[in-house]
């Protein structure tokens, strides 16, 4: 499964469980791993790895079956899937509700749909906005360990600062 | 002549004929060649090379006088013209209605205006929108061989999918 | 101090003087140095170096205390400050009204606020718009030597052309 | 701990165990992750992730305490440590026998020495040469699961081919 | 067929003819297209396109069946073939005597061997050395039109200068 | 004038003086600015800026006439001169004993020869080797302020470490 995981939320966790019900192993690919400290991408690749690792452990998912791998973007979409193949363990199923991702695999893997992803509150954009507005309900949309890490790294202040700065860059 | 050719349409073909009337040889430079599977840039560099090659041949243009060359973008505009010079055969006329491109050549080439480019329907944005909306008139704006290639590579479905996905990226 | 300096204006000059009152030396970092011939970034890195150098000299600032250094962007914000450190002389104070820049320094430098930056007319966006609209008042917002260089390099025509082209790119 | 892991061998495994004796968690950073199908770097990032994951599991190391993270190189060494920080979980000890790596950390982490790394046969260069020469002893220098993966992905033939091609590239 | 074509020589021409005997169309991919003014890579991508175009025309090869496409390198070999696919017309046979190239295609194309490539004098390294030493026999190894272009662009002096400079760079 | 300035030595200083005798202004371009902590390129761009600035001031050269500008490399040599133009103030003379650099300027500037560069001891390679070997004579080849900065930043230990590490990289 692939995502930006800004942050990793309960919808992502549900998909992780679905994959492990249907497959032997789970590869979680963190896309846009090089972006951080942007309102749309507030957390570093390393922080997102921590979040996912802790969330899986909190759910007592067997980490011997899991891989968590950061991937940087490729501006050439047609080349991207070959890049993905080169950076992750061998796999033969891709979970994606995004037809775009599916179209780039050149039919070399099976595509399966996520079951629980589309609930409105399990959505990174919505969660970041709640954090930016100071609404504590955002914690209900993410695993406990994720909200702990977000607070440890100063993520709430960071997101509030970034929504401000992005719309009013004084110098830069 | 330079363009993104997403896709190559009758306006581009008219300009190709104009150039060959006024010059000995024609160099067609495909810009943004590294982009593909984006709504604004749906076709790969390779697909665009095919379209142009076939369209010129369909019009019985002498391919011994033609060069079709993909070029990737350069974020530094002031450096771009030197890059262009290094990647194409020697030339001394540039056809461009775009004052911006002209300003980057440092007056080292002659600039000539395209004659027929500005008709509303010979416009990549308009053609992609027609395809996305399922309006078959788009075929009238491109050479027959181009519409054939677009259909062979699944270009109609691709553009419909991309206009959808770009505005609603679920995960990515 | 850091900025894009498109162009270097009186607010930047005031900050330069403030820094030299409070510190021994001044390092002016030109960000986004690789961009040029874009409406938002019309001047090359080299042109901006000239503007700043001349403006400091015009104000009789001691250039033995000043460094003017172009820096290209880094898509990874968390890595950016390490990059900055590697490309400029040793420093221990950063002048920035931008909380975002401050947050990336990992508390390894002191942050001080610019005093005079926030006047409406000392603003690159506003100055470029005045130039594009042909309003000669823009010259009042920049040092005399900066307006001279802008005119020498054809900057007025360039900005007028870029505001036109960016909103209506014919081919490209 | 950091390495290229071409391939992951018994010396690396010994260091992994040492780290987990002395620390709570282990982060294994796979450097030069973007290189592959070169004699010096025969295995892809993904293949190396598989090797390390399987080798740790084979040794019954608790994978809940382990992170395996591929990192691409940075040509600017002084920026590299900031990049590393942005891509991995928080850490405060770095295991490295390489004074060079240590010098780039700007004294922000503790450096500890690997204990068992320096045995001659636990050395990637030596192991690749044994494989290239068809000497089966190479299997004694790596965990069983690593030799299995190398054989599954055709790694022996790949290394033999690469030592040949690198010294005699006909066309390329 | 793929090569660096520094320069395009009679061995390359023989392979071009072989391909057109066995296939409907010929795609000539110019690798390392971004390198130039290096002793190993003296000619620009554009100069190499000219050489190949003229050489094919000199041999009365039907250019309606030919594509000449410059490609820049990819440091990630495992991703390279996907990149190649995205930048050239559809193809299903690859001519290569280089097992390395073949190994990267993931068995998605047929591989055929060049018949005449291995003659000692049809070799870019040898031809560049002859030029550098001022031995006029190099002209016998390349098509007439190629030697003409090399002389027009000052290629003989360039190669002599580069062999000198590369081994004794004073400043740079 | 262009150089890597690893480090800036008395030969470079002599050339600086020559330029200011023959021209109104001096632009010193620091090439390969992104490299550092390599035996061949031990100092960062920022450290080299400091060295040059201090050395010019020590010689009582008028810094109002001087520009010191770091430039990163461009793998495409034919594009490089356009890049240089975009990043430095306007200039019309280039001082270079290197025919290679001259050949890339496309005859758009005058080339003049350095007068004093070729003395054996004014040579970066030689100076770095003396430092690595612990021979204090290296200080005689560089301005006093340069040797002071090298010692302040730990440059002697760095070079000794790098000559060691480059030839014996244990892990990396």
Image (cartoon, coloured by chain):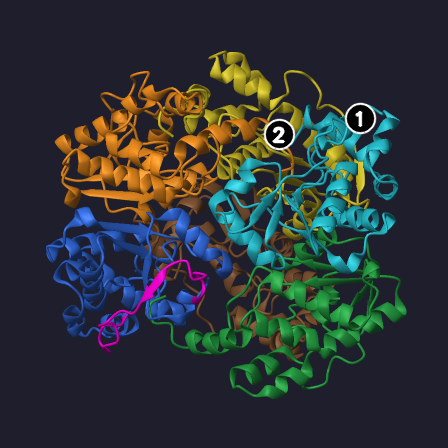
Chain colours: A green, B brown, C blue, D cyan, E yellow, F orange
Q: Position of residue A42 (x, y in %)?
A: 55, 70
Residue at left 61%, top 32%?
Answer: F169
Q: Chain of mark 1?
A: D
Quadrant of the image for the N terminus of chain E? top right
Q: Which residues make up the magenta segment?
A: C103-123
**Residue that label 2 marks:** E59
Q: Chain of mark 2?
A: E
**Residue that label 1 marks:** D130
Q: Viewer-proximal residue, D26 or C12?
A: D26
**Is disc 2 placed on a helix, strand or loop?**
loop
Quadrant of the image for the C terminus of chain E? top left
A35 magenta-colored: no
Q: Position of residue B5 (x, y in %)?
A: 55, 61
At label 2, counting other C-alpha atoms closer than 10 Å, the crowd grade (few under 14, some 14-19, many 20 or more) is few
Q: Viewer-proximal residue, A74 or B161?
A: A74
In screen coordinates, is A44 left or right of F8? right
């Amino acid at each position: 499964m692939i995502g930006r995981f800004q942050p990793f939320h309960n919808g992502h966790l549900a998909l992780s469980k679905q994959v492990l019900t249907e497959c032997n192993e789970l590869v979680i690919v963190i896309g846009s791993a090089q972006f951080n400290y942007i309102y749309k991408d507030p957390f570093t690749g390393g922080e997102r790895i921590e979040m996912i690792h802790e969330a899986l452990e909190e759910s007592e998912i067997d980490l011997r079956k899991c891989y968590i791998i950061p991937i940087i973007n490729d501006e050439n979409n047609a080349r991207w899937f070959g890049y993905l193949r080169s950076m992750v363990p061998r796999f033969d199923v891709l979970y994606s509700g995004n037809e775009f991702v599916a179209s780039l695999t050149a039919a070399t893997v099976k595509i399966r749909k996520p079951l629980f992803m589309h609930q409105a509150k399990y959505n990174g954009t919505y969660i970041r906005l709640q954090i930016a507005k100071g609404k504590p309900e955002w914690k209900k949309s993410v695993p406990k360990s994720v909200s702990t890490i977000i607070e440890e790294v100063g993520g709430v202040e960071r997101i509030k600062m970034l929504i401000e700065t992005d719309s009013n860059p004084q110098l830069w």
